[in-house]
Amino acid sequence: MITITPVRRALIPVDSAAAALVSAPNYDEFQGDQEIWDLLQENPMSVLRVTMAHCQADSPETMGVRDSQGALAKAGTHMEELEASEFTEEVRDILWVYEIGDPTRPDVRQIGLGGMARTDEIRTDATPGGTIIRNEGAREPKVRGRADLIRATDAIIGMVNNGVDDASGEFQRQLEAHADAAPPDLDVPDQHGNRHRVWILRDEETIQRFQALLAKEPHAYVADGNHRSAAASMLGYEHFLSVFFPAPTMGIRPYNRLVRTSALAPDQLASAIQERFAFDTPTDALADADPYQPTETHDIGLYIPDVGWRRLRPLPGTFDPDDAAEAIDYGIVQKNLFEHVFGIADAGDDRLTFVGSNKDAAWLQEEVDEGRASYAVTLPAVTMDEFIEVCRQNRHMPPKSTWFEPKVRSGLVMALLGPVHS
C-alpha cells in the first residue's frame, strides 16, 4: 500500500508564465556550480537561488560554499522573497496531476500523482516491510545538506520521483482522463524541450479517489530523490514531497563516467582489461567512429586518448547473473574496470566523475582530449525491468546508475512547513 496525503500548505507559481520564471532543474542535474551560475544570470528568479543559494553571486569567483551557514542563511532569505513575490501563491490541501511530455518519446504519456508520501513507508533495515523502496544508498553528508536546507527555508522544494507497477493500467487511465477533461493550471517547457503540465486537485472527492487508486499499489520504487527522502527522515518528519508515475512510462537514459588517474601504458592497459573483458582488437577498434554510446546491455564504451573508442564486453564469471544489482553494467565496470584496472575501489572516489545524459559521449570525449580527464566510459541505459528487479531483490543499484529522463522539475509545487494562518 502507498499512502499519499495532500500538501497542507503549498506554494505554486500563479500561472504558466510565472512557472517558467520560478521552476528549474533540480540541484543535482548540473555538472558544476558554473552551470548553475550561468542559469541564474539568465533567470534570477529561478528556485535555484534557494536550492543552490551559494551560486547566486556577482561573479563565479565570488560564489559561496555549498551548505555553509552563509549559504543557508541566504537560502532562507530567498525563500521568504519567493513566498512574498507576485509570481507565487499559497494554496491549501492539494494533490496534483503531473504530466511530462517528452518529444523523444511521442507515443508515451508519463503522467503521475503528486502529494506528500510517508517516511515510515520507506523500506530500511529498521522497516523491512516498507513499501517505498530506495534504489541506492544515501550518503550522509548529502542527506544532511538537504536536511539543513529544509530547516533553513522551512520548506520542502524538490519532489522525490517514484515509479509504481500499475499492473492493471487503471492508475494511468484515471490520470489521463482527468488531464484530458480540463486545461492544466501550469504548462511550462524545460531546457530539453520537454513539456511539464500540472493540474491542481482541490476537490475532496477527486483527491480521495486518487488516494484510493494509489493505495492499491503494493510498492513504489524511488527513481530520483533518495537523498531528499532521506533528509525528511533524518529530520523526523512524517512526510516528504513526492510524485508517483506508472513505471512503464518512465524513461531511463545512460549515466556515464569520466576517470581521472595516471594513464597506463597501452600494453599494460590492454592486458589488465583483457583479464575481465573481451576487448576489441585494433582492427575492430572504434577509433575512427563517432563518439560511442552503447545501447545494448553488456556493451561498454571506453575512450582512450590517442587511441579512440573501444568496445568492452564482460567475460563470463566476472559477475553473478542472478544478482540483479551485480549484473547491471554499472556494477560490472566498478568491480572489473575501475577497481581491477585503475585501482579505484570506492565508487565515491574523487577520481571518478558521474556524468548524466544531459552530456553526451562527444562531451566526454572532449573532456579527455582537452586533458581534463584520463578516460571516458560510456554505458547502456539500465532497463526499467532491471531497475525494478533490483528493488524487488531488496538490493541497491550501483551508485549513479539510473539517469531518469525526463526529470521532474523543481519549483512547480513546493511544500511550506510552517503553521497554517487563517
Image (spheres, rainbow, N blue to C red):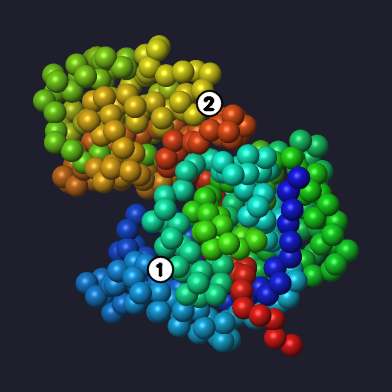
Residue occupying image coordinates x 80% and y 37%: 168
Q: In this rendering, does residue 42 appear at all?
A: no
Left-right relation of 414 to 297: right
Residue occupying image coordinates x 77% and y 49%: 214
Residue that badge 2 annotates: 324
> Seen from this angle, which residue lies furthest front?
126
List x then y, in percent, for residue 211: 80, 55
Between residues 182 and 212, which one lies in front from this camera angle? Answer: 212
Q: Is residue 180 above or below residue 256?
A: below
Q: For mark 1, give the secondary structure.
A: loop
Q: Are marks 1 and 2 in contact (CB under 8 Å)?
A: no
Amino acid type assigned to the residue bearing label 1 in the image: Met
Residue that badge 1 annotates: 52
Q: Is residue 317 above or below residue 220?
A: above
Give me the C-alpha separation between circle 1 and circle 2: 35 Å
- Asked which quadrant contains residue 315, the reply is top left
- Asked which quadrant contains residue 259, the reply is top left
Number of disc labels: 2
Left-right relation of 196 to 63: right
- Asked which quadrant contains residue 277, the reply is top left
Label whose residue precedes the other's in the sequence (1 or 2):
1
